[in-house]
Image (cartoon, grey):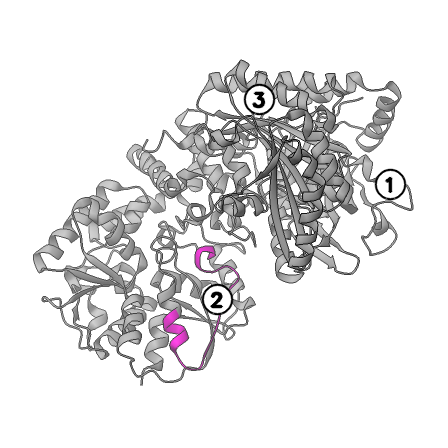
Amino acid sequence: MERIARLLANIVGPEYVSTASEERYFYARDPGLMPAHSPDYVVLPQSTKQIQQIIRLANQEKIPVVPMGAGLALTGLVIPLKGGIIVDMKRMNKILEVNEKARYALVEGGTSQGALKSYLERHHPRLRHSVPDAPPTATIAANVSIHGQGRLTQQYGFNSDLVSGLEVVTGTGDVCRIGSCALSGSWFSKGAPMPDLSGMFLGWFGSTGIITKVAVKLYPKKNLRDVEIFVTDRAELVPDIVFEITHTEMAEDILVFTQPKPMMFKDNHHVSFYITGDTEEELEFKRKMIWHALDPFIKSKDGGFMGIPPIMKPVLLESPQRSASRLADVKKGGGFEYSGPIIMLEAYPECMKKLQDLAAKYDLAYSGMVRIIDCGHAAMFAFAFAFNRADADMMERTRNAIKEVSDFVLDIGGLHWKPTVNEQKLAIAHMDPNTRKLMEIIKANLDPNGIMNPGNWEVC
Amino acid sequence: MKYEDIIHRCFRCGYCKFTSDYIDFNCPTYRKFGFETYSPGGRMWLIRAWLNNEIENSERFQEILFSCATCANCVEHCVFTFREDLVNIFMAAREELVNKGIIPPPVRDYFKNISISGNAYKQPAEQRGKWAEGTAVQPYQGQEYLFYVGDVGSYDERAKGITKAVAHILAKNGISFGILGEKEICDGNEVMTLGEVGLFESLAEQNIALFRQLGVNKIITLDPHALNAFKNYYPQLGGNFEVFHYTQIIARLIETQEPNIGEYQAKVTYHDPCYLGRHNGEYAAPRKILQSIPGIQFVEMLQHSENSFCCGGGGGNFFTDILGGGDEAPNRIRVRQAIETGADTVAVACPQCAKMLDDAINAEELDGKLQVLDVAEIVMSALT
């Protein structure tokens, strides 16, 4: 172990390698409920070249390598299941380029969402990227790697759909550029019109390579932004309500939330939609379009607009929403866990019922949140439960509830989002054999020694 | 351990590491060391692990705890209701280590110096008031204010210049004040933040008794760290005094007396001391002073006020130097932030910050491009 640590120190510098029990304890776990497993080494590289050297060393020594952003997935994706080297990417945090006219930003693989948001606000105020509601420490590369979503997902798709170029170090130690950047210095397309190779890295959780640079598409940032909430107490109408809103093409973002407390929220489904405009006139036009679209639900007394209290509006308009993290302290216990399957929205009523059943069965505080993806082509339904980290029984009940969601997802034809290792195994078991074979080919060629985030997507 | 009932409530979301506008990570130890373990969330999880016997009290664990600059960036930006107690939790964990007697040698030596000499510099008490020789400054004898200088302002050569500047401004503008001279002992703020509560209480009780004996009601402090101790810790021990930082007095002078201030040509940015700003909410007074001086072009650093980046000297690190050294030392990061503004002067309002940033200017080889001056030194130069 000392020999390897010395070799790693030669690569990144001795101050950026640790085998200490403190780092091995902390990096063994994420804030969720998955079992801990210690790394042997934690390293903080600062360049693509250093990552290349780390992966080459790991191949020689057959040591696992687990890349890590902020480690916020909650499903154990950066827990080093077979030990090895945690590569904490956050020292690679430079914003390398913003191309205003082609609307993309190129950043290093450890750049945080918050840093890019702040940079754009200061230097390119008419542009924005799709900011997730994960804490701003979440890194852009990790977020696209797990097919994360953000504030522009309703309009433009998963954040991984908004990638416009990648630089990766494959499991063989090769540095590879994906997209227009492979041919030129421009990062405007991740594939088209050529074969799109980004799929060999996006969604693989680092098990085929480490993203060292990522370019993401930027979109117009309007001067004004507002939010409205349409409420119904009939779960079965939610897909129709969302369909009507998306049909107008007027909404920036659409979320549906439900929670039992405070009492005013109980048993209601809150469809919150965001609108933007450069002028009040534009905003009002969009608002009216959506009002008209929802008019039939009001006339049939199936729903209505909720007056948003002044104290609540800034909370809803904040991006990222600090309130999303605060769910962790609902039980004064520092934890929440959620399973967020990607579903077709028509499954909303079933999911809603399942969430409430599980909360009752396991006596848990719950919150349901749905993010509409790409004009309603899909939705992410978060089955979220708050737990107290000091209450082992509550943690176990939460684990059991989440496990039930894992099985339920496949029953309703959904896909596990940022799946746990067990969910990955479920998916592989249910997968078309030829699809699995294709994944095997990719994995075997990009990571022949099986060192990249082993345990994840183990198709071979 | 105190606060044990809330230690598990950290979600380690990382808001605490940032500024409010996410410009950059703003936790000085996280910036310096880079490992998550050196962030507030890392400390929370490791303290809990230590209490649960999952990790031991190692040298690294001590470094993680004692390198914290107690700058309160985490208190400012954590999203949870227990955020007010974050620094208190880290101090409580230090207290546990102190009580067990297993602490870093520089911390142990600091406590020794204070307990033996009454100051951090191991200097005789008679030297404490030497800076006032040749000035008209009088011992405290019932004047309106006690001017409490503190260890750094009394013994450090660089800081003594700031002490003299403050005394000169106060005297020139008719403020009735006196000093304790050789009777002054350490205020104990760093002793407290480093977790030696017994020693702190002893110092505080001695100071409170002396202040009472001399009839002190109002105190002006040179050092924001002393301000913090007197305002926030002493009342719990019965020491209730009206306490001001010197910038608050000068700002009031500017408002009420309009002192004769001439031109001072400089492009100036201001570094907020954590114990004046985040700990005690005073952001306006130093800025008001600087902006009232003709000729000064005032510019803010990106990270300022509530988002100010610590110089790395807080939490006892000024004396123990656990957080210092290397390119990513907080004081070096801070002067790089200052030079980015185009300023030729970075103003401070704390002798510890002054010294920390002076050292950083040398390390960054910025001599001749950027200078560190205390607000008092600038005012003194501008007084006509």
Residue A202 position within the rendered picture, expressed as x and y whole percent measured from the top left = 76, 36
Q: Residue A263 magenta-drawn?
A: no
In contact (CB < 8 Å): disc 2 and disc 1: no
Amino acid under disc 2: Asn
Q: Position of residue B72 (x, y in %)?
A: 41, 49
Asked where in the image residue A81 lies, by quadrant, the reply is: top right
* Element at label 1: loop
Q: Same chain for marks 2 and 3?
A: no
State which chain disc 1 sits on.
Answer: A
Of labels 2 and 1, the one closer to you? 1
Query: Residue A366 appears at what percent x and percent y?
Result: 54, 25
Identify the residue position indicated by label 3 in the image: A35
Could you give the CA–CA distance between mark 3 and mark 1, rounded to whole angstroms? 36 Å
The image shows residue B149, relative to residue A190, as above or below, that is below
Residue A37 relative to residue A128: left or right: left
* Chain letter belonging to callout 3: A
Res. B260 image quadrant: bottom left
Q: Which residue is mark 2?
A: B362
Depth order, front residue of B262/A281? A281
The total number of labels drawn is 3
Secondary structure found at label 2: helix
Q: Position of residue B329 (x, y in %)?
A: 49, 54
Label 2 in the same subunit as label 1: no
What residue lies at 63% left-to-right and 47% top-to-bottom? Answer: A113
* Residue range highlighted in magenta: B288-308
Comparing labels 2 and 3, the label whose residue is closer to the camera: 3
Name the residue that disc number 1 marks: A196
Q: CA distance from mark 2 to mark 1?
A: 51 Å
The correct choice, above or below, for B30 with respect to A3 in the image is below
Is A248 placed left or right of B236 in the picture? right
